[in-house]
Image (cartoon, rainbow, N blue to C red):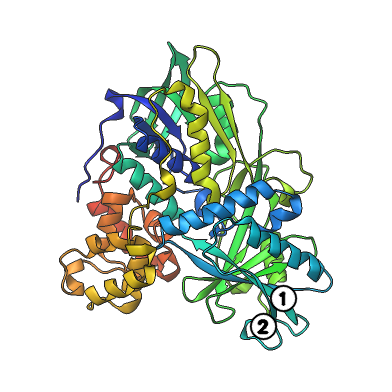
Amino acid sequence: MTTVANADPSTADYDLLVIGGGINGTGIARDAAGRGLRVLLCERGDLAEFTSSSSTKLIHGGLRYLEQYAFRLVREALAERERLLRMAPHIIWPLRFVLPHDTGLRPAWLLRLGLFLYDHLARLRTLPGSSGVDLRRSALGAPLQAHLTKGFVYSDCWVEDSRLVVLNAMDAHARGAVIRTRTGVELAHRSAGAWSAGLRDGVTGRRWEVRARAIVNAAGPWVGETLGVTLGIDSRAAVRLIKGSHIVVKALYPGEHAYILQQPDQRIVFAIPFERAFTLIGTTDVPHEGPPGAVTISTEETRYLCDAINRSFATRIGPGDVVWSYSGVRPLYNDAATEASAVTRDYVLDLDAPAGQAPALSVFGGKITTYRRLAEHALARLAPSFPDLGPAWTGGATLPGGDMANADFEAFRAAFAHAVPFLPAETADRLARAYGTQAHGIVGAARCLADLGERFEGGLTAAEVDHLVRAEWARTADDVLWRRSKLGLRTSPDGVARLEAYLARHATSGADSTAPA
């Protein structure tokens, strides 16, 4: 199994060097490549390895941000919710949320007012609006404790967050961008109107230098370090690191709806259907003072999330019920808010562009829902350096796999299942959801399950693994089982070892993996 590499970045100059392979970095790389810029994106780990795969996995306006009077952010996010749903209907889909009213917390009139604003701030709305619900008589109230007698229902969307990142990288690559995973930018300096940047391949150790007319610092939790150390820029903008953690337990209730639960500390916690047999619970908001890399949930955070469920659900849970947890560090713009949960989720673009010198744009904050608009705003800030920059274009463009008629996923899912009758129904459904129209390419000319090669746990086959290596920059078992999918929930340690052995036999080396075929 081989990949076809893009042009070797050691032999070419670029218009734009993007540092960071999370949602903001890949979104900016995609937008820029589509406007005609020569783009190089470097990510020192895997795509979406840190913050962008550790979200609550929602495309939403942010109902609770209304309490912070963040009306512009909510309005923009609600508009983006509609666009993203059309761009990627396979990995983004509508989700109904049940908001129980707890008489000891926010009054019912305030919740009703917030939902009225939420409904009407969305200029375009294809999702159902909010309504009241009698939890004593509705099935939606069945999993809840008896004291929760009334509530509200409203709409937002679910997203496969790490897959959204990968799809943006794939589209950027298709439009000419060079994507280098496991490649760090060690040091950069301005010279003769351009940036010279030293790169290091984290797999082979090879070092080389590239030139770029501008740099985008989308390094997430490392944005401050990259700005000050790697780029040598002194900026007043500062990042505030906030850790958010989630737990996963066996399904607490039947159905495809989610719950949004008010807490005594004025925060909210979500309970969301997850991977068919589980419930995802999160998130926490705690200050993070340590290194911004891989982080884990604390005992206190686990207890907080269990307590949140136990205040509202009839079924009680404890730390022993947690089957998986994950944590991420959010790089929020430091607005001097006292409480971590009150720090703005809006984004700030910090441009350093001394006269006659190459610019550097640093991205602070942001949320998955507004990544596309953030990318447009980033390119607008850089436009003076690129007189021939093409117009904005991403608002109506689908992402890979999303090009299905009328953005109708249900019709596509049925047609795909009909075309692959030899696949178990669960596997066919998962492939349709994960890859959309590109699922046909994974199955190819196969006419039976054996044609897809070696079988791994959770319905994974060699044909799918080969696709992930060839087209989606996957290199390790974690890349496959936790970021390109969540099959890690259904894979034993022996199954992981077998997959790792397969990858070792078939995957290309880091030096050959600058881009998918």
Q: Is residue 297 left or right of residue 454?
A: right
At 21% from the left and 73% from the top, the residue drawn is: 449
User: Residue furthest toward the right?
Assistant: 104
Q: Is residue 106 left or right of residue 208?
A: right
- Which residue is denoted by mark 2 in the rendering? 141
Give the label, 2 or 1, closer to the camera.
1
- Dividing the picture into quadrants, the one containing residue 147 is bottom right
- Proximity of marks 2 and 1: CB atoms separated by less than 8 Å: yes
Where residue 151 is drawn, which disc sits there? 1
Q: In the rendered structure, which amino acid carries the disc numbered 1? A: Gly
Q: Position of residue 15 (x, y in %)?
A: 38, 25
| Distance between the alpha carbons at the discs numbered 2 and 1 | 9 Å
Q: In the rendered structure, which amino acid carries the disc numbered 2? A: Gly
Q: Position of residue 416 (x, y in %)?
A: 28, 71
Residue 201 appears anywhere in the view: no
Q: Nearer the viewer, residue 206 or 173?
A: 173
Q: Is residue 390 left or right of residue 239?
A: left
Judge the density around disc 2: few (<14), some (14-19), many (≥20) Cα neighbours within 10 Å.
many
Secondary element at tag 1? strand
Secondary element at tag 2? helix
Q: Position of residue 101 (x, y in %)?
A: 76, 73
- Dividing the picture into quadrants, the one containing residue 86 is bottom left
At 52% from the left and 23% from the top, the residue drawn is: 231
Q: Nearer the viewer, residue 214 or 514?
A: 214
